[in-house]
Image (cartoon, grey):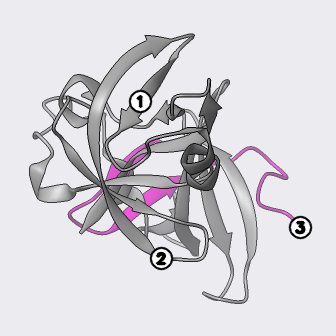
Amino acid sequence: MQVVVGRVVKPHGIRGELTVDVRTDSPEQRFAPGAVLAARARDGSTRRLTVAAVRPHGGRLLVRFTEVPDRNAAEEARGLTLLADAEDLPPIEDPDEFYDHELEGLRAELTDGTVVGTVREIIHSPGGELLSVEVGEPGTGREVLVPFVTAIVPRVDVAEGRIVLDPPEGLLDG
């Protein structure tokens, strides 16, 4: 299984550097020179990229990949999702922290056990993390964004394949 460790936002400069939004707690390991990442394009195609150089820049990273030699190649890399193998991720010590891939696909239920949907994605926003929950039948439900805070998500049980929601009135209404 592969997990998202970053997303290419845009090219930077004329030498092929890419601005990357980091989605990993260990960027120094994932984006170390010589590290190889899988890169998935919006059309689903994938390719391998080797980190040549990296430097911090305004809360993001500027990354140069061996396979992206210039601005034109960097433009083509815009929007790539950068992936690493889940087996290579270090274990998390904090019981209240999770990798995105551990939450995606979990059953979402209310405190009384009523199943309301499935966690489809974790959205990292400036205001905090949001769970994209498909409410209703899989494939036909509607998306509801649920703030990933203890007051609304009091329990996450990866082993049981579920999260428990205690939403404020109206949050899950369509």
Residue at position x 29%, y 56% in the image: 157
Which is more N-terminal, label 3 or label 1? 1
Q: Point out the stretch of residues depicted in magenta.
A: 154-174
Above or below: residue 36 compared with residue 96: below
Which is more N-terminal, label 3 or label 2? 2
Residue at position x 31%, y 43% in the image: 66
- Where does label 1 land, which residue? 63
- Where does label 2 land, which residue? 45
Tag 1, which secondary structure? strand
Mark 2 or 3: in front is 2
The quadrant in which residue 134 appears is bottom right
How far across and down, in percent of the image, does residue 27 sit? 29, 27
Cα distance in 3D space between marks 1 and 3: 41 Å
Instruction: Reply yes or no: does residue 78 show up in magenta.
Output: no
The quadrant in which residue 174 appears is bottom right
Q: Are marks 1 and 2 in contact (CB under 8 Å)?
A: no
Q: Are marks 2 and 3 in contact (CB under 8 Å)?
A: no
Instruction: Reply yes or no: does residue 169 show up in magenta.
Output: yes
Between 106 and 171, the residue placed more toward the observer is: 106
Above or below: residue 109 compared with residue 163: below
Q: Local crowd at mark 3 within 10 Å, few (<14), some, or many (≥20)?
A: few
Above or below: residue 65 compared with residue 116: above
Cα distance in 3D space between marks 1 and 2: 21 Å
Q: Which mark is residue 174?
A: 3
Above or below: residue 128 compared with residue 119: above
How far across and down, in percent of the image, does residue 98 sit? 31, 43
